[in-house]
Image: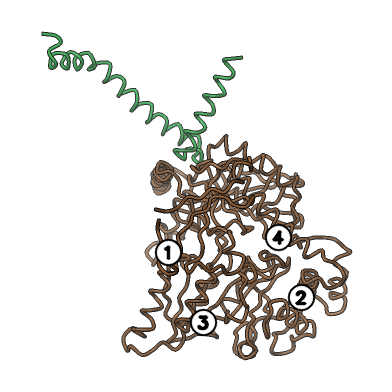
Amino acid sequence: MALDARSGAPKLQLNGTNGRRRHRPVRLSPGGVRNGAAAQGRPRNRFEQAPLYVAVLTYVGFGIVTLFGYFRDFLRALRLEKCHIAQERQELKEFVPLYQDFENFYTRNLYMRVRDNWNRPICSLPGPVFDLMERVSDDYNWTFRLTGRTLKNVINMGSYNYLGFAENNALFLTTVAEAVRGYGVGTCSTRQEMGNLRIHEELEQLVAEFLGVESAMTFGMGFATNSMNIPALVGKGCLILSDELNHTSLILGARLSGATIRIFKHNNMQSLERLLRDAVCSGQPRTHRPWRKILIMVEGIYSMEGSLVCLPEIVALKKKYKAYLYLDEAHSIGALGPTGRGVIELFGMDAKDIDILMGTFTKSFGAAGGYIAGKKELVDYLRSHSHSAVYASAMSPPVTEQIIRVIKGIMGRGGTNEGLRRVHRLMENTRYFRRRLREMGFIIYGNEDSPVVPLLLYLPAKVVAFSRAMLEKNIGVVVVGFPATPITEARARFCVSAAHTRDMLDKVLDALDEVGDALSIKFSRQKFSPRSELYDGTDFELDS
Amino acid sequence: MALSDAWKRLSWIYYQYLLVTALYMLEPWERTIFNSLVVSVAGMAVYTGYVFMPQHIMAILYYFEVIQ
């Protein structure tokens, strides 16, 4: 029997206990200590690998399209075929090229062929169902025209509408309408000049209370919150340790700051610890002076993988090596945790352990903008030193009021617990959706609690066929391929919402079943039976 | 009845072939070029087999001293 290295307790692999359903083995955290909800049987992130032939066929597919791409470029060069993309004028041929022909190879020869699956025009609000405008192309997707027909009530599985607050209910939106009448729609100024309205102060106090921190500051745009505030916090001589799969806004902010950036493998604590050790021991590259600051940047939910950050381990590491932690809760705030406080609440941790909490209001709150929260000194510093505060326009009043009403709803003020009910409904929908997809045999990435569900499709043609087939069944999905994902791991990304009823989810699941069989994308080699009686016994498998 | 089922099955297999080789994304004339290449290569393999299989089988049987 294997013994755990540190605590000396036997290593157990539990395959289902106490009548609760568990489909995968559960490990206790390293010291055998249970910390928070996540270690109480909640499994870690799963990234199942597809069989080898799938990777081979993916490359074969890309290879064939690349060959035909070269062939078509050759025909275009010989003027046998009309070139639809931007080209320089004849008189400028000897100049330095303006349009790099080869770099656009992928766009020209792959994306353009199938781009009817992206940028579809929507003509209603992005709720659980929406309306699409039908568009067709006569020349293989180089140009589109709208036929005039609207596809009504397409089920929306792509919008970041986790709590369903992208809604049109006049009853819920009375305060927002009053804010428009009282404050207008534009603030016409920056926060530092004339744009600091009373409603902004109210929102910031509310956000600080919601998160359980001393103070918070809000910004008009979520992307700009990251990219404009990281340069204010770190500079040259500082070190940023950033997760492999961080969002572009974090990467942009890190690059703009001028600090040294080192990347650790996704959610891999050994990699992070090694980097921290090297940084603390060796210091800056040539001078070996100690780093001025070490900032670890992670996200709550990684939106392309649906995986959760290993928060307890990271906080333990940061305390041990005296680094700072920047947690970007763009997708997880409002969507995780028993009362919607995000990934910190899910792990049962204290918000005071994390130095800089950042989040956006675009996803769960149905508005726009972002916030940074933490100690009062930090936020006061940012109020005067952030680029966004000084130069960017302040958040629009109706948007601010929308966020206020949503936060009040989630916290239970205003007499109704509609917000909390939505948080619970989201959790139920997520669990149901993920469980059914696993049972059907699809490969799903990520943690069981995350409302972002990536379904792996791998082959480029299947990605396209999937999107079209789902649209024919009146379901709108988002598919992503290279370069947003690794080249062999193209996927469809579902965002479960609290506004989805069980009926809608069942309809989507049935459609997925059919399309999955027609396209043969059920690659999973782990079989989960839908019959729960099989899992209710205690079934220990001891490592030996 | 059986014929239409068989046709549906063949159609599904062709669809899988298009998906796996990414021909699904190409225009019809490009599919024709690729399919002609595949058919010609397969045809040449079958023809070579037809011409040389008897000789090869006789050689093997001779080697294992089944025939003299």
> What amino acid is found at the position of numbered circle 2 in the picture?
Thr
The residue where tag 1 is placed is: A4
Q: Colour of chain B?
A: green
Q: Secondary structure at mark 2?
A: helix
The residue where tag 3 is placed is: A324
Cα distance in 3D space between marks 3 and 4? 31 Å
Cα distance in 3D space between marks 2 and 3? 30 Å
Task: Work out whether residue A425 or residue A44 is closer to the camera in this orientation and state it.
Answer: A44
Q: Secondary structure at mark 1?
A: loop
The residue where tag 4 is placed is: A161
Which image quadrant for residue A308? bottom right
Q: Do callouts 2 and 1 mark residues in contact (Cβ within 8 Å)? A: no
Name the N-terminal-most of marks 2 and 3: 3
* Whether labels 4 and 2 share one chain: yes
The residue where tag 2 is placed is: A400
* Whether labels 3 and 1 share one chain: yes
Cα distance in 3D space between marks 2 and 1? 51 Å
Q: Secondary structure at mark 3?
A: strand
Q: Do callouts 1 and 4 mark residues in contact (Cβ within 8 Å)? A: no
Which image quadrant for residue A283? bottom left
Q: Position of residue A302 (x, y in %)?
A: 55, 63
